[in-house]
Image (cartoon, grey):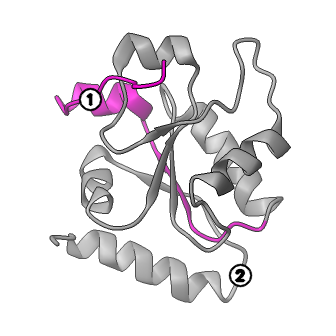
Amino acid sequence: MKISLQIVSILLFSIIFGTLQAATLIPLTPGQLKDLQQGDALLVDIRTPREWRQTGLVPGSHPLMYFDETGHADTDRFLTSLEALGGTKDHPVVLICRSGHRSSQLAQILLKDKGYSSVYHLEQGIQGWLKEGDKVAPCPSC
């Protein structure tokens, strides 16, 4: 398992610093996300089914819509579905959206309001992933 020194540093910093103060959102570049894919982080794509069909998914990610087409969200429904995927408050979760905006918003909710301690987001979303030329997988349930 190849994990970059930068990712290990980020994770260690998160663990150590997180015990001293409230958890902080950590944005990831596509390269950093590739390193985390080798570990046990849960990757969750929070876009809409239409968006998943348009671009596909980061390989290994789970499609789990948070904001609907009109921008509304059902946090309790999302958390129930996240837990069914194995997401817990202490397990690393990486959120992915189109540009990084929605995933950042949801990550803040999980960290500040719901007690999650290890939440990351792909800082430029699937757009940044595709811009780097990284491969996507079709959405199996869309």
Disc 1 to disc 2, C-alpha distance: 36 Å
Q: Is residue 9 left or right of residue 42?
A: left
Residue 127: within the magenta? yes
Q: Which mark is residue 8?
A: none
Q: Is residue 68 above or below residue 33?
A: above
Which amino acid type is shown beneath numbered disc 1? Val
Where does the image place residue 15, in percent across and percent down from the top left? 53, 83
Are there few (<14), some (14-19), or many (20+) residues within 10 Å of tag 2? few
Q: Which residue is mark 1?
A: 136
Q: Residue at x 51, y 66 (%)?
A: 92
Q: Which residues are magenta?
A: 115-142
Residue 10: within the magenta? no
Mark 2 or mark 1, which is nearer the start of the sequence?
A: 2
Closer to the camera in the image, 27 or 42? 42
Q: Is residue 63 above or below residue 21?
A: above
Q: Residue at x 26, y 29 (%)?
A: 136
Where does the image place residue 12, in percent across and percent down from the top left? 43, 83
Q: Is residue 45 left or right of residue 133?
A: right
- The quarter in which the N terminus is drawn is bottom left
Callout 1–callout 2 Cβ contact below 8 Å: no
Q: Which residue is mark 2?
A: 21
Closer to the camera in the image, 81 or 55? 81
Q: Is residue 51 left or right of residue 68?
A: left
Which amino acid type is shown beneath numbered disc 2? Gln
Q: So how many labels did they put on this image? A: 2
